[in-house]
Amino acid sequence: MDNTIVNRAADNIRILSVAMVERAKSGHPGGAMGGADFINILYSEFLNFDPDDMTWCNRDRFFLDPGHMSSMLYSVLALAGNYSIEDLKNFRQWKSPTPGHPELDVSRGIENTSGPLGQGHAMAVGAAIAERFFVARFGEWISHKIYTFISDGGIQEEISQGAGRIAGYLGLSNLIMFFDSNDIQLSTVTDDVSNEDTAKKYESWGWRVITIDGNNADEIRYALRKANDEKEKPFLIIGKTIMGKGAVTENGESFENEVSTHGQPLSNAGASIEKTIKNLGGDLENPFMIFPDVANYYRKVNERKMSNVYKKKALQKEWEEKNPVLSKKLHKFLSGEIPDIDFTEISQKENVATRVASGTVLSYFAKKIENMIVMSADLSNSDKTEGFLNETKAFTRNDFSGAFLQAGVAELTMASIANGMALHGIISVCGTFFVFSDYMKPAVRLAALMELPVKYVWTHDSFRVGEDGPTHQPVEQEAQIRLMEHLKNHSGNNSVLVLRPADTAETTIAWKMALENTLSPTALILSRQKVKDIPAKQNSSRFSDAVNAQKGAYIVQDVDGTPDIILVASGSEVSTLIEGAEKLRKEKGLKIRVVSAISEGLFRNQPVEYQEEIIPYDVPVLGFTAGLPVTLQGLVGSFGKSIGMNHFGYSAPADVLNEKFGYTADNVCKQIEIYLNEFKNNKKDIKHKNSILIEI
Ligand SMILES: Cc1ncc(C[n+]2csc(CCOP(=O)(O)OP(=O)(O)O)c2C)c(N)n1
Ligand SMILES: [Mg+2]
């Protein structure tokens, strides 16, 4: 086959990429130049998409892993008509659609935010599972391919172990991964850090692997054909590519395979930008140009795509006419509409652990929500995602009729897969122990940045996990994740909704909030141990009281007139406060208000009048948390006091720990008295000694 125009298009991508980086005075030209041949053949000859509507549901997906190669992606998308030359010239500039690392923008063909290496291809695994899930429900006509592009960095990241294992185990033959194997990374050559046999590694996980010259159009085409024919296994194309392909020095000597071209303009790296552009057939006066013959070629490419799209859309229409009920369901799935759930129908057992209450809600969801996938990192029986699993079944090779993924012990992979599923229109839920949320944070951050409505089920929420000891006792985790409530996403909303329900009714309401929150991820922080239900208010039911949790914080027990003190907590500590308050009311006649604060971030979004009504500024406020005192600092204010943990915990039965650490009604009473005295006599002291910890 004559590859003249194909190679010219790849050179055009190379020129645009280096010109973008040169103009921005920052970026990553070397990798982009090496990957250009693959990306060009993929987009022009294989990837199915609708050039007029990049959001078309049945398009093939392309997930970039090394976001630093963004200039390569923007350039090929410019050839396809999705970016203007002006957009490319504004690479990395304020509010341009061409940020340094790609940010989710499906209408322009950016399927995922990328940059943190490894996550991009793990999201592709999530999308590939979602594709199989759709095919199992609606038929082969909706099948499409998930392509992903990975580099040396992604291959080295630990997450690739989880992604590779799961894709191989599930036999995701709809997944095609290109490994841009240029043997060079940011600061060294790969030989300086690794001598693994990558092909064997993937083969052992159950992948089909082929190694090619990744700059040779015929070999790329051959490999992609093979990959498209594959029926059993995910397909890895190891493309041996040349870093900085086509780069030359002032003297016209080759400047290929140089580490220095990884992350700076070619002219800074030691190459000549002028000679390189010339070497690649470009116009030095006008490097930001799509060659007329290449533009013409891509016009034809788009015409071919349109005729393909037309055929696929006709198939869909035929299917829809024959299957009106299923078709209605599909449109509901794709609309992102929230399933209609009557939460009053969910009946909870009394005084159970909030993880158990969550399991009850999930088992109800399994019967009512058809586009939800739940997963767990080998803890389904403990984090109670089994509530969902018991009503469905786990995915296995060739069987995606269920809706549960046993992710194995791979929390970051799981969270990243959940992102990929969410990008593919699935309501994804993932569970593990709260202490291991630390393993998931990078993917939570990307979910927050992409504004994906992923739900996290984090159970075993405090030192009360007991005998497992400090390795398993979350202390600082709540304060960490609540920081995300202070961080706004690009739409101006709290970047994560963090909910720690105080009893079974609040757990049902927390799930209602999680499901209805389509603007950000939601974290549910749940107890391992039983929690006493909060008593219902007079002439009310506990459920209708708990509905107020939707405001972030609300009064669960009150007094007539101004309270002497307001007690604030979330989760299990609320019932301990209630017990202590009852004692003090009886013994000392104190007027005590108790507030349950399921989410500080949400509370702060309420009108000031509401906040002032619940926690007025001039009343003493005492916070009580199983986390760090800082967890409640924002709620108790300057003259309030927050009591919490100042150590990692210890190994002992939970009841012993409660006694030793002071998480008892008696200690609550004692702390209230101490604090009220301090408040009366020594406000200044409180301000400066805030967050006094329980000594052990
Ligand atoms: C999780 C993560 N760690 C570190 C980095 C910083 N970083 C960006 S690219 C890169 C390695 C580059 O090597 P490779 O993936 O082979 O890209 P190439 O140099 O071939 O363009 C590193 C360490 C990152 N982006 N993400
Ligand atoms: Mg590399």
Image (cartoon, helix red, strand yellow):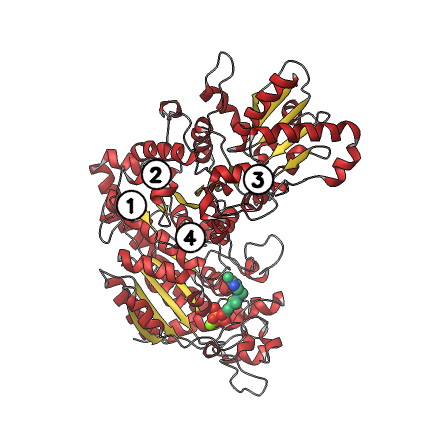
- Of the two numbered discs 3 and 4 in the rendering, the one whose residue sits closer to the viewer: 3
The amino acid at mark 3 is Phe
Residue 167 versus residue 10 in the image, above or below: above
Q: How far is mark 2 from mark 3, CA to CA?
A: 48 Å
Precedes in sequence: disc 1 or disc 3: 1
Precedes in sequence: disc 3 or disc 4: 4
Element on which disc 4 rests: helix
The answer to whether mark 4 is within 8 Å of ligand 1 is no
Question: Can the viewer see residue 70 in this picture?
Answer: yes
Q: Which residue is mark 2?
A: 333
- Of the two numbered discs 1 and 3 in the rendering, the one whose residue sits closer to the viewer: 3
Tell me, yes or no, whether the two marked residues, 1 and 2, touch with CB atoms within 8 Å: yes
Instruction: Return the x and y of residue 137 as percentages of the image width and height.
Output: 25, 42
Element on which disc 1 rests: helix
Residue 217 versus residue 628 in the image, above or below: below
Q: How far is mark 1 from mark 2, CA to CA?
A: 10 Å
Camera-side residue of 666 and 339: 666
